[in-house]
Amino acid sequence: MNGSKYDVVIVGGGPGGLSAAVHLSKKGLKVKVFEKKKILGTPVRCGEYFPVKAEMEKLVPRVKNLDVIDAPPESVDTTCRSIRMISPRGHEFEFPFAAYILDRHIFESHLGEIAQSHGADIDIGIQAHYFPDDQGGWVGPTREKAVHGDIIIAADGYPSETAERAGLPERAYAGPYAVATNIEYLMTDLNVEQNVAEMYMDPRYSPGGYGWIIPKGHGRANVGIGIREPYVRRDWQIRDLLTGFIEKNAVASKRLAGGNKASMIGDSLPVDGP
């Protein structure tokens, strides 16, 4: 143990962990954040779709600190005015819902800078582990290099090693029906609408989940699928399902014709909350 002590140590420097760091450091608490990525927000692990504050207030009316995670203008690639749902038979249903499409690196870097401006320490590129004791616990890459926190926040995502080491009860979302695996490409040279996010219900290519085309401006879009394993045949591979969605879905294939794949990401996440 290196002897350094903090009021709060946060494991995970994504939007949740960094938002907690901003809020707590503003309250005057001594805060430490560990993030395993070498660059905040990179690589991207999601579609970067982020409801505007007015929509978030409707979704979570009891949350009082939404200003902490409001997106700064420089982190917004484009703004969507609506969501369009496409059924398995190609029927389209559109409804208004305002959202930002973010540049996650800029967004998370912004949160980190605010936290640091209020005194928080942020260490990136470190795979930190939690070593519990009777009063909070120790966190660091090894026990010898760990720092102490009176409170430990497990913001390390699914599956959370920190929560497991803390002995927290296993949540319902740990079951296979409640965990989604996603994969997406950032595609370029597209002629898609830049103010509408599209969600596709197509069990052939996104069994147990859905597909999406989320515009990012300048002819770009995040194009992906989320699936749940119990609905997937054993001989299916998720990358092949995404290729099928891009090339064979009756509606999406027309939207994406002529586009190029710039990068690919994938991840797993709970789909029914903590």
Image: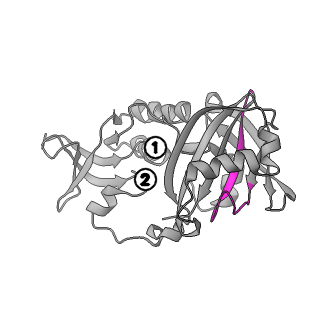
Residues at discs 2 and 1 in contact (Cβ within 8 Å)? yes
Residue on which the image places disc 1? 14
- Region of the chain picked out in magenta, as a range: 200-218
Name the amino acid type tagged 1: Gly
Q: How far is mark 2 from mark 1, CA to CA? A: 9 Å
Q: Nearer the viewer, residue 161 or 15?
A: 161
**Residue 98 coordinates in the image, percent (x, y):** 76, 47
- Position of 207 compared to 122: left or right? right
Name above or below for residue 170 compared with residue 77: below
Name the amino acid, label 2. Answer: Gly
Residue farthest along the front direction in this orientation: 235
Q: Where residue 94 sits: x, y (%)?
A: 85, 54
Residue 253 placement: quadrant: top right
Whether residue 205 appears in magenta in the rendering, the answer is yes
* Residue at (43, 53) in percent of width and height: 157
- Point out which mark residue 157 bears: 2
Q: In front here: 215 or 19?
A: 215
Q: Is residue 274 visible?
A: yes
Residue at point 25%, 44% (across, down): 6
Question: Which of the two labelled residues, at mark 2 and mark 1, occupies the earlier sequence position?
Answer: 1
Scheme of image coloration? one colour
Disc 2 is placed on an element classified as: loop
